[in-house]
Amino acid sequence: MTELADAVLPLIRTRADVGRWSSANEHGEQMNVAVDILEAAVTDGDPADVYRTTHRALASALKVIARADDSSGIIGSACRRLLDLHPVVAARAGVAKAELVRWMMDFQFHQEEVDYFALDPAAYAAALGEDGMRLYRAKLDEVATTLGPLPPAAGEWSIADSQERWALEWNARRLAVYDRDAEAIIRTHARDLRVAAWFEDTARAFEEIGDVDKAIGWADDGGAFDKGHQAKHCAEYWSELLARYRPTEYLEARRRNFSMWPDAAHAGALYAAAGPRWGEFRDEVSDALRSQPSDAVIFALDSLKDARLAWDLAHSLDLADNRLWTRVATSYEKIDRLAALPVLARVIEAELIEANVHNYRPAARKLQRMRRLAEGSPQASDVDHFISEMRERNRRRPRLQQEFDRAQLP
């Protein structure tokens, strides 16, 4: 073991019970520290040593994640960082091409630990060179010849060799990008144009090879595909592309996105893009959001930073979201602290209709807030009377009474 390996590998390996969520999180943080050490060693360390240690760390990391509860994704993050680092250090170390190809094929087609990480062959181009890439393609072709025809009407994961087929398709997409082959990119990424996400995949591939016009065109088509979440995501990417490469078209893109999905998020994006031209769109946005009280209020609070408008909209549009009412009251209390009292009281009553212990502490805190707001005003006694009513009305909920006592309520 070298000094680098001694510093890195003990942080990756563990006999702890990483099947426990908390233990997995703790060890995942440790693994990311190990990757930090490796990344720092890339420029100064011995290339062969850095590669060997990274290679061993990756193998060990996969063994760890195979038995871990990685719900938080911390261990997975370390694994992905190692996968990103591996081709870089392989190129610096001049790893034998045949050895590297053999490992890449084993990783993708004979991996015993996990099968949900992918290698990017384009990232290995510097390490493999032209000869190595030819050898790698030949090995992929060998796998393809063993599969046979796809059974008719077969589900994507209902056939025995689904993982091999997925890996081959993934490699075909990445190699199309490596080759900068527009026709291959469309064939492998857009496929049969059945879902909006494939339009975005195609657009991202074209941006990767620097074909901005095609990237924008495919993202534009994907965003207009339908009103589903995939199209929405693609439309957001389309807007980002225009912001980067055609800024004069960005504002109109934000306007179109809002017309497709008239919600607080898209209204906020349009508001930010409009800048001094916001007056041109104010009525259009306001009219569209009136049918969605929550979005109208959120937009007023988060984008316009207008507590008075949010207050007026919440009342005139009959806002039904109690959590949002709490935000409105908290924001408006800076304008009229006593006006917030009946809103908070109404929210508390709604939260305590059902015996839900998760609402007890928040209710007690809101009552504390009401007392602070009313302090020194004629409403102070009304608030204390309201608290007494809440205690009496919920006298058979001892847990709630405990929260009231903890909050030092009368």
Image: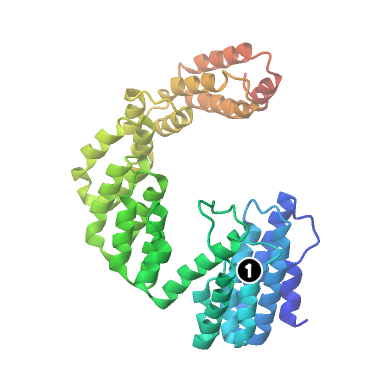
Q: Quadrant of residue 15?
A: bottom right
User: Circle 1: is it few (<14), some (14-19), or many (20+) Cα within 10 Å?
Assistant: some
Q: Is residue 312 above or below residue 19?
A: above
Q: Is residue 302 above or below residue 64?
A: above
Residue 151 x, y percent position in the rendering: 54, 56
Residue appearing at x 36%, y 63% in the figure: 203
The answer to whether residue 13 shows anywhere in this view is yes
Quadrant for the N terminus, please: bottom right
Q: Quadrant of residue 89?
A: bottom right
Q: Nearer the viewer, residue 207 or 243?
A: 207
Q: Quadrant of residue 402?
A: top right
Residue 232 x, y percent position in the rendering: 37, 48
Residue at the left extreme of this rendering: 280
The answer to whether residue 27 shows anywhere in this view is no
Left or right, 75 with respect to 266, comes to: right
Q: Nearer the viewer, residue 400 or 202?
A: 202
Q: Is residue 20 above or below residue 392?
A: below
Residue appearing at x 27%, y 35% in the figure: 288
Left or right, 82 with respect to 287, comes to: right
Q: Is residue 67 above or below residue 354?
A: below
Residue 223 x, y percent position in the rendering: 33, 52
Residue appearing at x 31%, y 32% in the figure: 309
Quadrant for the C terminus, please: top right
Q: Give the residue at mark 1.
A: 109
Left or right, 206 with respect to 392, comes to: left
Instruction: Give the secondary structure at mark 1.
Output: helix
Amino acid at the residue labelled 1: Phe
User: How is the rendered protein coloured?
Assistant: rainbow
Q: Nearer the viewer, residue 148 or 387?
A: 148
What is the total number of numbered labels drawn onto the structure image?
Answer: 1
Q: Nearer the viewer, residue 114 or 346?
A: 114
Residue 351 x, y percent position in the rendering: 55, 23
